[in-house]
Image (spheres, grey):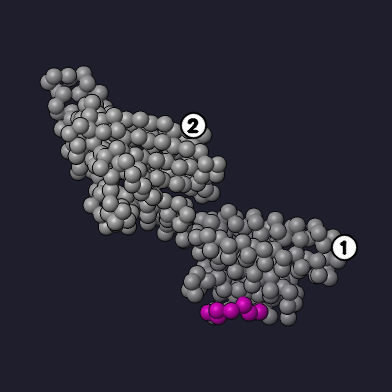
Amino acid sequence: MDVVLGVLLGMVLAASLAAGWRFVSAPRRVLEPGGAAMQRAVHAATTILPHLRRGLTTESAESAAPALRVLTGADAVALGGADELLAYEGAGADHHRAGDPLESLVPARREDRVHVEPRVPCAVPGCPLRSAIVAPLALRDRRIGVLVALYDRPGRVRLEESRVVAEAAALVSAMVELSELEAQGERLARAELRALRAQISPHFIYNALAAVAAFIHSRPEEARELLIEFSEFIRYAFARQRPYVTLADELQYVEKYLRLEQARFGERLRVRVQVDPEVLQAVVPVLSLQPLVENAVRHGVESRAEGGLVAIEGRDLGTDVELRVSDDGDGIDPERAAAALAGRGPGIGLGNVHGRLQSTFGEGYGLMVEDGDGTTVVMTLPKFRAGVRAG
């Protein structure tokens, strides 16, 4: 994703500079200061970006078309899909509209390169359009539409104009590809979350209900409170929500989980939570901290007659956040830890959480397992990441 963003920024710069040169060098704009022209070009290029992050649709095309007209300096621009116009802006807008066949504007041919149409095939009398530059929009070598820049003069167009239209089309294509990559990433995150829910639910639900059942006759009021905690946790864990939440939300439901486990283990389970307030609004994948805590309970408390301590610590590292989930159990073999992070171990969700963190934030983030007096799982994530928002 970072590589795509780098390529995209390069395309923005290239399109902006090319458009600026077009504004500065065109004879009919000689009175316009070059700096102002360049500023308009850069502004137009950056204005296009947020609209096309939603993909190439009629709505996003209509929003981007005015900026594309400024960027190319054309008398009109059109964005087309496979067979019809998605948006039109500029001269001739009284009879060229979204939904019209693409052939009403440019001849039907499937060229995969920028080309000039010396004559616009419009059948409406008085149409001011005479020529056009047609640039394909491509998504991984697959043609998905066209960008058409139209002019009120017949015949040949200048070389600078063709370059600007080609750069603008490359910019549009890059944004559409980025939107698809983001959609794929979100679909993957949702699929991994469903897998984690399926893995956690049988183990946790059985134990939680068993703890509640143990209190129904002897301590009915406490059993009622535990059932409320259980229902709120289940609603959180299995709700159809966005795959991201704030750390404060995740911690709130981790504490509900721990109260249910304390009802089960009693004094055998000791808990310590210490989190810097500055990191509570960081965004994390939902159910990213709870599986680490559940593993600590299973391996550091459940397997030992004397029980143990589960500690949750959160530290502010400036631009990053470090979360540590520790137990004082027998520790873990490094090979088993590596297998768990790779998704090959029997543990609950370590590989799943690690994969979701890396797919969301990049290779520099994720989980690390420390073995010493017990086991510590360290989660590192950015305090802020553009495009990743809590639901």
User: Which tag is nearer the camera, tag 2 or tag 1?
Assistant: 2
Q: Label 2 vs label 1: CA separation? A: 57 Å
Residue bounds of the magenta highlight? 110-116
Residue that appears at 57% across and 55% down: 51
> From this viewpoint, which residue is outermost toward the front?
373
Q: Residue at x 72, y 65 (%)?
A: 17
Tell me the element at label 2.
Answer: helix
Q: Can residue 298 be seen in this view?
A: yes
The C terminus lies in which quarter of the figure?
top left
Residue labelled with disc 2: 277
Q: In this view of the protein, which residue sits in the foreground, 68 or 340?
A: 340
Q: In which quarter of the image is residue 319?
A: top right
Which quadrant would residue 172 be assigned to in this image?
A: bottom right
Judge from the rendering whether residue 139 lies leftward or rightward of residue 155; answer left or right: left
The circle on residue 208 is none
320 relative to 30, above or below? above
Which residue is tagged 1?
A: 31
